[in-house]
Amino acid sequence: MAYNPGDIVLFESGAAGKMKFHLCICVQADGDLHSFIYLNSEGAGFRDQFAIDCKRIPELGESRTGQTVFDCPTVHRKSSAKLARLRSKRICVLPKDVAAEFLPFARRITAMIDADKAALIALLESLST
């Protein structure tokens, strides 16, 4: 299973114990290692959590809080083989307007390692133009 930066992907999360949405921020190692951040329905107001009205990405459906929250500090890396075992499925691509709004926020993130932050910013820049 190969995904592209900007894809929103649904797959089983061992930490959450259920299927969760994730944003692919980077693909490395000849396309086999994908880096993702969680999309949650809670967490707005926490450090480095970018929140939007969930209706802005309609493919994700309504959340119980009415929000979609991007958990920027926590990056998960998955191989293509692991993604296949986790029943992954591409849902949509992050909308251009959300990427454009997310970009200035991403530049101010402090709780993400530099390489992941750079990948997120590069992704948002590419989707915003």
Image (cartoon, helix red, strand yellow):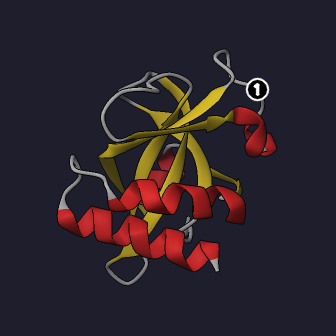
Name the side, left or right, on which 48 lies relative to 55: left
Amino acid type assigned to the residue bearing label 1 in the image: Glu
Q: Is residue 29 left or right of residue 12?
A: left
| Residue 119 rendering spot, x and y as whole percentages | 36, 70
Q: Secondary structure at mark 1?
A: loop
Residue at image x 52%, y 68%? 124
Relative vertical location of residue 8 with respect to residue 119 in this rendering, above or below: above
Say above or below: 64 vs 22. above
Crowd around label 1: few <14 · some 14–19 · many ≥20 (10 Å)? some
Q: Is residue 111 above or below residue 53?
A: below
Side of 69 relative to 64 (left or right): left
Residue behind mark 1: 62
Where is residue 43 shown, x and y percent of the image? 43, 24
From where the camera sits, is residue 116 visible? Answer: yes
**Res. 63 image quadrant:** top right
- Which corner quadrant of the image does residue 38 belong to? top left
Screen quadrant of the C terminus: bottom right
For the point 45% across and 60% down, which residue is it?
Answer: 104
Outermost residue on the top side: it is 64
Percent from the top left, x then y, of residue 69? 52, 35
Q: Quadrant of the N terminus?
A: bottom right
The residue nearer to you, when weighing 29 against 55, is 55
Work out whether residue 61 or residue 9 is closer to the camera in this orientation and state it. 61
Number of dots carrying numbers = 1
Residue 106 placed where, x, y %?
39, 57
Residue 32 in sight: no
Residue plotted at (60% across, 51% down)? 9
**Outermost bottom residue:** 30
Residue in the image at 44% along x and 33% along y:
13
Q: Quadrant of residue 71?
A: top left
Front position in the image: 121 or 91: 121
